[in-house]
Image: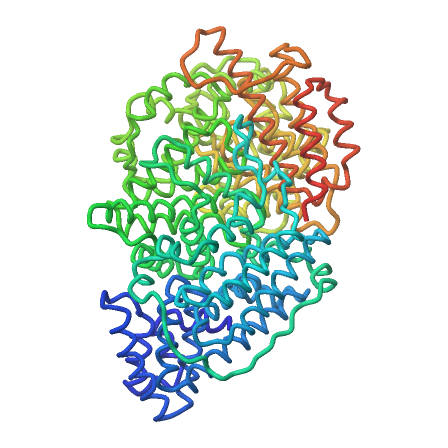
Amino acid sequence: MNSVLHNYCALDQLTLKSPLLKENSLDEVITRFKNIGDDGISLVEECVILTDMITSIYHKDESYIEAIMMITKAMIIEQPHKQPNIAFLYIQISKMDSDITIKIISSVIQELQEQLDLTATNDSNILHTNVAGPWTTIKLLTRFISLLSPIIGNKYLIAHYRNIIELACGMNQRRIILANLVLESALINIPYLFYYNRQSKVLLFEILTLINVAESTFKGNSQIVNLFQPFCFDNEDNSYTLEENISLKKIKLLLNNGLDKFNKIFPNLARNVYSVRCDVIRMHWSLRYPKLKELRETQYVKSGYSVTDNIWEESTYLTYESKFDRNKYLLEEQSLIEYDQHIIRDNVIDIVHNLNFNKKEASKKLIQLENYLGNAPTKSDEEYLKTDINRRIVTTITSLMLRLQYTNIPTVYYSTLLQELCKRKATMFGPLLGEQFRFIYENLCSLDYEGTLNFEKWFRLQITNFDFRWKWYEWENDCTCFFDMTYNAKHIFHQNVVKRLLNSTSNISDFKTNLPKPFEKLLNNKYFSEQQLTKNMRIQFKLEYADVDFNNAGLVYLQSCFDFSPIVANIIDFMKQNKSDRINNCNLETMNIFLEQIETDNFAIFNNFSYFALELLTQCICHCRRRSMSHANIYISLFGNVLLQLSEKYKIERELAQKIVLESVSIYWNQNISTSFLIINSFKQFDLVDNLVILEFLFHGCDHEIKVITCYDARQFLLNTLEDEMRWSPEINVFLFVRAYRLTLMVTSGALNDLDIGNNEDLEIPECKRYSCGTSRENNTRWQYFESMKLVKCLLRKFHSVYRSLADILINILKQVGITHRNTIHAIVSWVKECQNID
């Protein structure tokens, strides 16, 4: 099945892979079949043509039907919105030649059995080969056979639904984590049983009986997982229960009082065909279902292997969508409980994930949804209907991008997919993406720490690929208002986006042309301010070097104001000439000669020569590698150990020496801190700096600013450092994670102390408007508090597998750092407890 997904998505691939396609007749059938519903002709007319073609091919050579089977299964998974068209086609074929339809259905049933078997496997290699997870594939295959209800015996369909629903109820009673998913995968398919079968009262009665039994057995999951909420500190009630999805109660309301309601939730296609009258084909089939014990044993395998499978059980993107629907930018409020909205969202998720290997094909299928889904429009509301469906596409993809649990699909896939949609239909999707940008921007103060990183990456990618065009003037007042408020989320967003865009383009003039004047001031932002660099110079030198130009990134000691600059140039020449020399002793001896010459000739100007020596050599390495990372690794491997040997010579403690190295790299790349962290990572790979020292450096305040809160690169590097520890270390250094947690709490505690509020006083995010100077300082401290709390939440969620066993230690640290604020303690303790229950 999995090879089908990849090999039969495009006709040219199918032609290459299958020897059966040498004859033009089959080639033509595949082409028309693959594009069913796309040509604008009526479904009945199209199916008449395809029926004649398929039956003709089948009677020429029965083996040809294998190719038809494979493309059918691929389209069921990759193009779920076309399932009604394909089902109608096989219903028509059954009238002319039931053997063909029986073979297709048998093939689908066989695939369904294989996927049911996969739900009870622990073999990660098999699970990794599935583009769609087994439960997602079961859902889509079940939908297809449900659409064939006019020609399939009721007893088989009822038996299948009974087994799936009973399995879900059994899982629910034993608190197996996939229970909600399994139930909802059945509930969302039930209306498809009546898509072409509006007259079967027996089928309706049997389904209602199943729902009544399940309703008395299945207990809705009302657990709130705050760690997974993309928006924090929201005053609105974001409680999540099964009722927010497709519930048993809602399905009953949909099915009661006749089936005429389906005219409202299915498109004009169903109203044209309405109900199909045909004979039930004679075939018998049965399925084996996994045992509860087997599912219990595999419940911990779900994350990462079947990304779509865990979509429905989490509340994360539902909360985001409902929040967006309350936003003023919507033309008309849409209720999430409407079934047609669930259908749109379900199809979007399946297309996005099941075609993740080809974003161009995925975008093409998403654009087709407006022709397949939604109510049958009148002429007056047709444009609004298309906008509404496309808005649902954009909000769903964006909410998937903001999901916070583990996924094996990189978040950049979602942003590039949205970009592709915008390129294909700019006039339609451009404004919809603008709505998303504005909504998230207005809620930045409550957006999760990791969610902010994802949004910044998406925003930069989007406008970079569209010549930096954005309505910057909308944010101009905010840029002015919050310019001096270091920890305001909008200011953090402004400075990170503008600075990183500047560093990622060679066309600086065009970029600046699109920026209003208030944003131009952000272009001068550096990791270290000139005041901080001057302070650093005073640690090393007795003289004041007023002529040093700190605006030029790079090695300042080459400037003529330093008398020893010619020797520095000699050091660089030596490094370049000996970059292929692996004799470190020679390197050390030569460096000692150079450094001793500098110290001897200029001994009167130094306060701390040992500090200067390490900084100089580190920055010389940076200077020699500035052309590429491969050069960097060469020079670090050759001269990195010399740094350690020099620190031993000057009797500098290892931890302090590493701190000097980190600071020196960051000073050299002060204007492009992204490169700085790449170099730091190379130093780490050569065991020249430790993760613990990196951690301390990231949390070290500079210019009265904690960079791990305000700098995008520092924020990302913190998470990357901890992820590397999880991924590559044979034994995880638990102390590293405890230290990250403690350092974050110290930021929180510092903010609370500065605010000097009572232990029982409520803290609210300040409104985003202009304040007086005194009030501004207080609100900046409040923003610091909330940003640090976001980081606490992010750490506990992202690395819960480490923190879950440290609950007592984590709670005790709250007391050690002096946090006594009641609501703060309550929030963090609840997160600590939640991370123990995350699988």
In the image shown, does 203 or 175 lie closer to the viewer? 203
User: Is 334 placed above or below 308 here?
Assistant: above
Picture colour scheme: rainbow
Q: Nearer the viewer, residue 481 or 336?
A: 336
Measured as percent of width and height from the top left, residue 252 is found at 52, 52
The residue at the point 55 percent across, 82 percent down is: 284
Determine whether 645 is above or below 346 in the image.
above
Quarter-of-image position of residue 328: top left
Examine the image and state in which quarter residue 93 appears: bottom left
Front residue of 429/619: it is 429
Measured as percent of width and height from the top left, residue 307 is found at 54, 55
Residue furthest to the left: 379
| Residue 497 seen in render | no
Q: Position of residue 11 (x, y in %)?
A: 34, 73
Q: Is residue 525 left or right of residue 41?
A: right
Q: How many marks?
A: 0
Instruction: Look at the picture and state if 711 lies above or below 584.
Output: above
- Residue drawn at x 44%, y 63% is 192
Residue 410 visible? The answer is: yes
* Image point (31%, 88%), residue name: 56
Residues 429 and 462: in front is 429
Looking at the image, which residue is at 51% across and 64% down? 131
Seen as rendered, the residue at the extreme bottom is 60
Task: Say left or right for 545 vs 431.
Answer: right
* Left/right of residue 13 with respect to residue 24 in the rendered view: right
Q: Position of residue 9 (x, y in %)?
A: 39, 69
Vertical side of 214 occupied by 692: above or below: above
